[in-house]
Image (cartoon, rainbow, N blue to C red):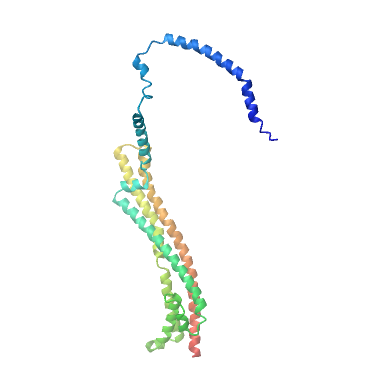
């Protein structure tokens, strides 16, 4: 049997057993309260009718008046909810001068440019990795260098190197013919490799510039904002916490924004440089193999 089942029954039994005591206590309290109330009523002077009728006035109010009483409270609550933060970024933009707005726009341009370069470079590097796999799969299985180059994508850097090697062989005449063929082909392939490496470095200089300068740009905005905040406080003559916290806090936001722009740019720069190194290792390995294949093809012919 459940041991918790009899609990309501026990409570009900206790209430019924104590009922006489409760009734006796209430009767005693009532007998003592009635004479005291009568004595107070005799000792208190009669109040005018207006005073007796004044308290029921709120109960006799019409529904329209009750709505009017509640309306100001709702309006006040709604106004408190809709109150703008006087210390936020929006207030910083509205209350700032041309210099502060210029700094904010400059940091915005830096941030947008950094994220754009990050996304574009990641896509380019992923594409080059796919092209490296395609070159390893399709180029070396072809019969000739020209056939292998035709099997690659027209925009592939590996096809660019193959075409450079073929053009070096074709243009080995005239004054260029005095250069040894081995060196001439190596020079043509090396120029192609340097061109590819230059393309992979595009945009990284911007990330490095943003990572190194955006904290100082934000710091300049902070110094400028604190200067104007202290000037306003000096003019007003009030240095209380509510007068200092807002302007100085808004100025410090500039430093936070500068760091928020710099940190992703620095991390992205280091990461993309590492990925470029891996891509260029594949490019240099292909160029060395291509040089050996082209020289071997010429010797056999």
| Residue found 42% across the figure and 9% down from its top | 43
Compare residues 54 and 86 and report the one nearer the observer: 54
Image position, residue 212 (x, y; %):
40, 58
The number of numbered discs placed on residues in the rendered structure image is: 0
Of all residues shown, which one is farthest toward the right? 1
Residue 94: x, y in percent? 31, 47
**Does the image show residue 33?**
yes
**Image position, residue 85 (x, y; %):** 37, 43
Quick check: 129 left or right of 65?
A: right
Image vertical order of residue 228 relative to residue 285, above or below: above
Using residue 194 as the reference point, say whether residue 8 is left or right of it: right
Residue drawn 36% across the image and 54% down it:
217
Q: Above or below — where is 248 with respect to 51?
A: below
Q: Nearer the viewer, residue 117 or 21?
A: 21
The residue shown at (48%, 71%) is 130
Q: Residue at x 54, y 14 (%)?
A: 29
Query: Would you say residue 187 is visible in this rendering?
Result: no
Specify whether 37 is left or right of 240.
right
Q: Considering only vertical position in the picture, is 5 above or below 157?
A: above
> 148 or 227, which is in the foreground?
148
Q: Locate the N terminus by quadrant.
A: top right
Farthest residue, direction bottom:
301
Report whether 93 appears left or right of 21: left
Above or below, 292 against 69 in this view is below
Residue 170, how many percent across, how many down? 41, 86
């Amino acid at each position: 049997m459940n041991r918790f089942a009899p609990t309501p029954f026990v409570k009900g039994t206790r209430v019924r057993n104590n009922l006489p005591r409760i009734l006796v206590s209430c009767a005693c309290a009532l007998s003592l309260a009635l004479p005291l109330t009568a004595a107070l009523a005799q000792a208190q002077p009669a109040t005018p009718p207006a005073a007796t009728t004044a308290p029921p006035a709120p109960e006799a109010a019409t529904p329209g008046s009750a709505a009017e009483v509640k309306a100001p409270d709702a309006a006040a609550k709604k106004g408190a909810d809709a109150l703008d933060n006087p210390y936020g970024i929006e207030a910083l933009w509205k209350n700032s001068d041309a210099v502060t707005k210029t700094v904010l726009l400059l940091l915005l341009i830096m941030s947008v440019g950094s994220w754009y370069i990050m996304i574009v470079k990641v896509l380019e590097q992923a594409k080059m990795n796919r092209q490296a796999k395609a070159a390893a799969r399709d180029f070396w299985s072809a019969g000739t260098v020209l056939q292998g180059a035709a099997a690659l994508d027209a925009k592939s850097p590996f096809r660019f190197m193959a075409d450079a090697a073929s053009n070096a062989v074709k243009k080995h005449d005239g004054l260029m013919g005095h250069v040894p063929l081995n060196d001439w082909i190596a020079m043509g392939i090396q120029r192609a490799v340097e061109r590819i490496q230059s393309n992979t470095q595009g945009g990284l200089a911007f990330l490095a510039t943003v990572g190194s300068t955006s904290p100082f740009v934000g710091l300049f905005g902070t110094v400028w904002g604190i200067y104007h905040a202290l000037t306003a406080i000096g003019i007003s003559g009030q240095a209380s916490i509510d007068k200092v916290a807002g302007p100085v806090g808004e100025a410090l936001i500039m430093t936070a924004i500068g760091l928020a722009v710099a940190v992703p740019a620095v991390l992205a720069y280091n990461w993309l440089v590492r990925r470029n190194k891996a891509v260029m290792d594949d490019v240099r390995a292909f160029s060395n193999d291509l040089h050996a294949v082209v020289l071997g093809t010429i010797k056999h012919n």
